[in-house]
Amino acid sequence: MRLNVHDVDSELRRVSDFGVFGMEAGDLATVEKVGAYVKSSCIDLWSVVANKHLSKLKRRDVFILTMPASQAIFYDFTSGSDDLYTLARTWASWKTAFLKYVLIPVNLHNQHWCLLVVDLEKKMVFCWDSLVGFDGGEYVESKKRALFSFLKKFTGDEQGNWELEVVFQDIPQQTNSDCGIFCIEFMRAFINGSKAAPELKNQVQQASMRAARQHIVRELKEKEIIEKNADLARDKRERKRPNKFVNE
């Protein structure tokens, strides 16, 4: 089985036009500016590009639920369970026998971001939050009925019992308004192999947020996930490049 490439392409088309999508050039300033709150459009575009990257690598173990679906689960589904079933069925087309994890970035009242890590095998949802003091996971907890309903329909296991655990211990904490960058970097770290909270400390740090912002801006502009080692190699090449005007 393979990831449904048509769905990847559909997601890419959805974000291909900034004007239609609602992401304007100014939105990138929320990523570029240290301390700026990152808008949903930026995280959504990054998530779509990351799914494209995973598909290109033939990764079948994980994908990211993009923002329209996340917002629907946590805010917009008021017309009943039939709509939630349709949404779950649509995303189930991405599911393969090898899928183990789903990542869900969650916007909290347009003030904060956290990341949900869904372990399909254990039927556990872990909430990684970079700001212990925001609400202690209360909002996510209050929406777990809709979330679990989605997951039951997504997996096809209506009888399964799901659990939610809000994780603060060992989760890197922000000291600035960098929650959106932390959320993206949590996803990046997970995709790169950091599956548990204690493994994040060497991957996501407040001290590296400025560099992370610059890297993410480049990815958003080029619509491609760029390995950070490639950026480091490029920077080294540029530093070594001779100045042709020195001897002129």
Image (cartoon, grey):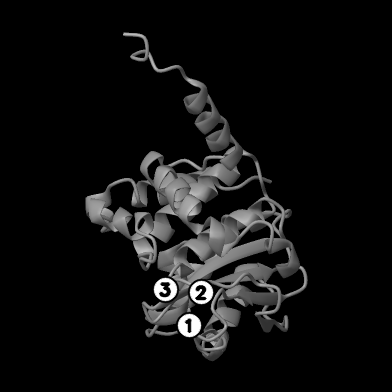
Figure check: 104 above or below 75: above
Q: Residue at x 50, y 73 (%)?
A: 175
Q: Residue furthest right?
A: 122
Q: Tag on residue 85?
A: 2
Q: Amino acid at mark 1?
A: Ser
Q: Specify few, some or many for label 3: CA neighbours under 10 Å numbering under 14, 14-19, or 20 or more.
A: some
The spot of residue 187 in percent (x, y) is: 58, 59
Q: Residue at x 70, y 79 (%)?
A: 169
Question: Position of 147 compared to 97: left or right?
Answer: left
Count residues near mark 2 (Cα–Cα under 10 Å), then give few for <14, some for 14-19, many for 20+.
some
Q: CA distance from mark 3 to mark 1?
A: 15 Å
The location of residue 99, given as percent across then percent down, is 69, 57
Return the mark for residue 71: 3
As shown in the figure, which amino acid type bears the numbered disc 2? Tyr
Q: Which residue is found at the position 38% from the left and 79% from the top? A: 76
**Residue 81 marker:** 1
In this rendering, position of residue 230 left or right of residue 181: right
Q: Earlier in the sequence, mark 3 or mark 1?
A: 3
Q: Mark 3 belongs to which amino acid?
A: Gln
The answer to whether the residues at label 2 and label 1 have Cβ atoms under 8 Å apart is: yes
Along the viewing direction, whichever of 165 and 181 lies nearer the viewer? 181
Element assignment for label 3: helix
